[in-house]
Image (cartoon, rainbow, N blue to C red):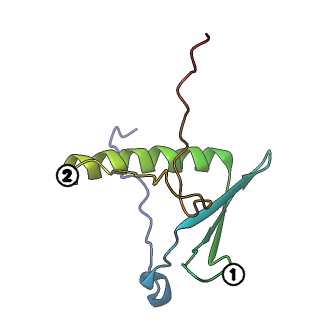
Amino acid sequence: MSNTLQNPQQINIQLGEKEAEGIYSNLALITHSGAEFIFDFTRVLPGVPKTRIYARIIMTPQHAKSLLKALTDNISKYESQFGEIKITLDQNKAEKQIGFQPQVQEPPQEEA
């Protein structure tokens, strides 16, 4: 019996011309069931009251969590190289914010 290590399986990934162009998105709608996560990517443009889904990605909860880990890792590497990504919210706007938005936690209020 040989004790040689086998190379891990390599995957040949091809990128088609259409996919290489990419799809711009500034809004993601995320839903889930017990078996899957669904990511719908769209874009909202000023003065355009209507949009459509440009891409839908469906994955298992395990793959969604792996995606979260990969995004967290890549954002950390990006910020190490280029600096912190700042997310600003204009609190003076009365209109509803659209696009990707961070969740803002309100500070706890002190009891009188």
Please give the name of the residue rendered at 28% of the width and 53% of the height, measured from the top-left corner. 78
Please give the name of the residue rendered at 57% of the width and 44% of the height, measured from the top-left corner. 65
Judge left or right: residue 103 versus residue 60: left
Judge left or right: residue 26 versus residue 3: right
Please give the name of the residue rendered at 62% of the width and 83% of the height, measured from the top-left corner. 48
The percent coordinates of residue 26 (x first, y second) are: 52, 68
Give the answer, above or below, for where 110 lies relative to 37.
above
Q: Which mark is residue 42?
A: none
Give the answer, above or below, for where 112 lies relative to 45.
above
Q: Quadrant of residue 44?
A: bottom right
Indicate the amino acid at tag 1. Lys
Query: Which residue is at the front of the view, 1 or 57?
Result: 57
Q: Quick one: which residue is furthest to the right in this view?
A: 34
Q: Secondary structure at mark 2?
A: helix
Judge left or right: residue 73 versus residue 98: left
Task: Answer few, some or many: residues within 10 Å of disc 1's Cα (few below 14, many 20 plus, some between 14 and 19).
Answer: few
Whether residue 10 can be seen here: yes
Q: What distance separates the C-alpha of mark 2 from that of mark 1?
A: 37 Å
Q: Quick one: which residue is furthest to the bottom in this view?
A: 17
Q: Quadrant of the N terminus?
A: top left
Q: Quadrant of residue 112?
A: top right
Q: Which mark is residue 50?
A: 1
Task: Answer few, some or many: residues within 10 Å of disc 2's Cα (few below 14, many 20 plus, some between 14 and 19).
Answer: few
Indicate the amino acid at tag 2. Gln
The percent coordinates of residue 97 (x first, y second) are: 57, 60
> Which residue is identified by label 2?
81
Whether residue 6 can be seen here: no
Q: Are marks 2 and 1 in contact (CB under 8 Å)?
A: no
